[in-house]
Amino acid sequence: MFSMDPEKAHYKTVSLFRTALAMPLGKSIIKSLYNYQSPKLEKKLFGLTFKNPVGLAAGFDKDGKFYKEMSHLGFGFIEIGTVTPLPQDGNPKPRLFRLPQDEGLINRMGFNNDGVDAMVERLKKYKAKDVIIGGNIGKNKLTPNDEAINDYVICFEKLFDHVDYFVVNVSSPNTPGLRDLQDKGPLTAILSKLMTLNNARPNPKPILLKIAPDLTDSQLDDIVDIVADTKIDGVIATNTTISREGLKTSQSTISDIGNGGLSGAPVKSRSTEVISYLHKKSGGTFPIVGVGGIDSAASAKEKMDAGASLVQVYSGFVYQGPGLVKSINKGLASN
């Protein structure tokens, strides 16, 4: 698969996995190979019960096309999206790149997705019974920032009956101007509006905020204040970074790739720093989902020791393969 274009390999891999699941005894064999269960792994957060703390990060299944298949790999939760109100193609290809020397990925996908209505239709057809599903929501590229709140409201209201929790994504570097919504004023407005709508429902859903690893300490202080003021349920730390510091990959290769968010092992340390800072600054008053460079039980535990209650994988899953989830859960259960 690593000899193929990364984006094509992604879809080819899932297609092959789907075929394997459809074969006689396919599901039972996959479950025996890749699932690990222990009561020690169960987590109760946001009013939800997670069978284990290892989730699939947003970006892997942007449209809700693969969560049914991925649910057989032992994840405690799966986050789909980022989804926007209207379909959009995203940025021109190629837009996904591997950095094998660094066990990292660079992407500038640009919220390519079929739109929220298509996602809703897929979710109506199949509800994963033994895995929690999160909906990661964003704004369309052509929506100006002063109207962004409307896009988040549309996605929230349309997805409400079909997901278990929400994630507000204002931290992707691949939609022009999106990260400006992390500033205290616009972010507070978006989250307050969603919380008002949420609390008007008889069964409110958890709302989390996904932040960038490139925020300064003063910006992280603002995040702590915003969580307290809006009373959202938690933070996902972190998204991809625009930094290219400390890479083993040659500078010429990095220059040829160009812009995009870097994920995987290169963001591991910074992600952990952000988790630790938020946890200490907030006094542990809100849950944190740790993401960034998790490729083993040890790196997952590192995130949890820093203050994360749950973890998510993506790049590590690409490099280590489907056995990673079982390996992490087994390691966490043994500690």
Image (cartoon, rainbow, N blue to C red):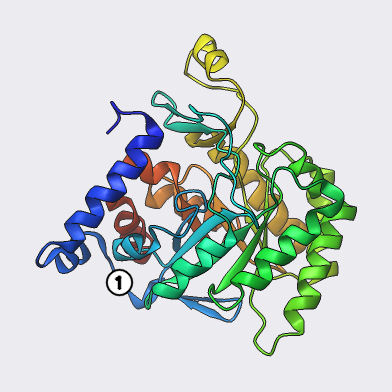
Frontmost residue, 233 versus 126: 126
Q: Is residue 122 above or below residue 298?
A: below
Residue reaching furthest to the right? 185
- Give the residue pinned by disc 1: 37
In front here: 224 or 30? 30
Q: Position of residue 286 (x, y in %)?
A: 69, 68
Q: Quadrant of the C terminus?
A: bottom left
Within 10 Å of the Cα at label 1, are there few (<14), some (14-19), or many (20+) other Cα atoms? some
Pinpoint residue 232: horizontal percent, then vertical percent.
74, 69
Position of residue 282 measured from the top left corner of the image (x, y, whole percent): 76, 62
Q: Residue furthest left?
A: 24
Mark 1 secondary-structure assignment = loop
> Can the viewer see residue 237 in this picture?
yes
Q: Residue at x 40, y 36 (%)?
A: 7
State whether residue 70 is above or below residue 43: above
Up/down of 11 relative to 120, above or below: above
Q: Is residue 46 left or right of residue 13?
A: right
Quadrant in the rendering for residue 245: top right
> Mark 1: which amino acid?
Gln
How far across and how far down the image is residue 318, in percent?
37, 41
* Quadrant containing the N terminus in the rendered view: top left
46 w.r.t. 202: above or below: above
Q: How many marks?
A: 1
Residue at 71% of width from left, 85% of height from top? 201
Determine the residue positioned at 67% across, 68% down: 156
